[in-house]
Image (tube, rainbow, N blue to C red):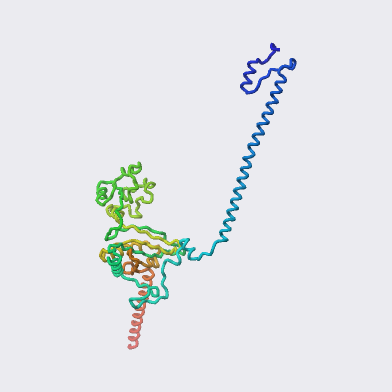
Amino acid sequence: MPDRKVVLTEDAQRFAGQMGIQLFETSAKDNKNVEDMFNAITQQVLLTKKEQKEQAVSRVPLISQQRYAARKGTRERKGKKKVKQEITKKEEFVPYKIKLAKLHVPEGPRRIVEKNKPEAIDDVFVTRHFMTRALSLSDAMQFHRETNHPSVYNSPDALITMKVELNMQLEKKNRYLDNFSRILLLPHSFEYQPIRKVMAFCKTQETQEEAVQGGADAVGGLDLVKRIQSGEVPLADYDYFVAHTNMMSEVLPLRGLIKKKLPNIRNGSVGVDLAKMIQLYSRGIEFSSTRDAYELDYGLVEVPFGRLTMPTEELEANFSVILKDIETCRGRTTGEFITRTYVLSPPSPEYFVVDTEPYVKKKATDDSSSSSSSDDESDDEKEKEEEEEEGRSRGQVAKQ
């Protein structure tokens, strides 16, 4: 009965609205809303089952697509394997030389080793049948001047380049010298490359003036370091960096910016003579060694040292300085480091082997052998003197 309700109709409707459900006020005694309530429940159950079936049907194609994609990928991989097998079976014969050419592998050793060849007696001979005859640098220059004459190759001011073959083998077996890079100030300069830009770090006013007179493009102390760190000075505009010894601690924070070009004592970019360092790094000639990837004991240095119009004395001076500097990079105390030196002058295809003994000391093995031979000779002379003295003493005893 309405007067005996525990929950009011307004409160029940408010709760049903919050929960999203239907509200029925029923009475079994009066048969009120009982049938409507059961019909609503039945309809809700049927609707829920229908939605579940539709969701299940929508998931089936996704699973089948995934399985189909997996089977498709497997079929593609198997097909590729079959194609590869067919290609390898149908590959035609390729000669060994052509395979090496495709792989860029050199055929035979790069170092020319001459054995069991006679010495040439005449001036005209077939070079491949006789030992190579080393020329003096003056003769090689004269030959290049003749071939680059205006009537032949028409390049009288051609660049002269030297190729130095090196033995990169170290004392231990299967150990080889690493590639090295050098920069050298030649006694006689020539037109070859533009002047490089150098930045100098120095504290005092005197050292800064010295660096400016030496040809530095940028000079400064701690203020320059701070400007570099803030990005005001672009480092890409400079090729090399030198520093005075009193700026070593201030330059260290730039290690991450300058990286390999950071001034250090080992490469000669830190010192007291700023003018000399600036001249070296701005006008010096750069060269480096290249070790062969397949013949590990073979190294090559290629560097120009002048032009054909220069006097022969100046060319010899540059040639000697470069050879002596390369000799200092040897990795072992014994054995020959510089094995052979060529001189060439493009566009002429000719190259001449130059005798390096007048410019570089003999190898250590020759020095040791010569010293041992001289020691043997001195020992023989001492033994002879002792024998003569013994003979004289015996003669005196016999007379007595």
Q: Quadrant of the N terminus?
A: top right
Identify the image quadrant of residue 46: top right
- In this rendered view, identify the residue nearer to me: 200 or 54: 54
Could you tell me if residue 378 is visible in this image? no
Identify the image quadrant of residue 12: top right
- In this rendered view, identify the residue nearer to me: 239 or 368: 239
- In this rendered view, identify the residue nearer to me: 133 or 222: 133
Judge from the rendering whether residue 21 lies leftward or rightward of residue 378; answer left or right: right
Reply above or below: 260 against 16: below
Q: Position of residue 79 (x, y in %)?
A: 59, 53
- In this rendered view, identify the residue nearer to me: 278 or 265: 278
Reply above or below: 98 against 209: below
Q: Position of residue 254 (x, y in %)?
A: 36, 46
For the view shown, which residue lies furthest in the bottom direction?
Answer: 399
Could you tell me if residue 390 is visible in this image? yes
Q: Measuring 68% from the left and 26% from the top, which residue is drawn there?
A: 44
Count up the numbered dots: 0
For the view shown, which residue lies furthest in the right direction?
Answer: 29
Q: Quadrant of the C terminus?
A: bottom left
Identify the image quadrant of residue 296: bottom left
Judge from the rendering whether residue 385 lies leftward or rightward of residue 6; answer left or right: left
Q: Measuring 59% from the left and 50% from the top, which residue is drawn there?
A: 76
Q: Measuring 69% from the left and 26% from the top, which residue is drawn there?
A: 43
Q: Position of residue 125 (x, y in %)?
A: 36, 76
Reply above or below: 21 against 212: above
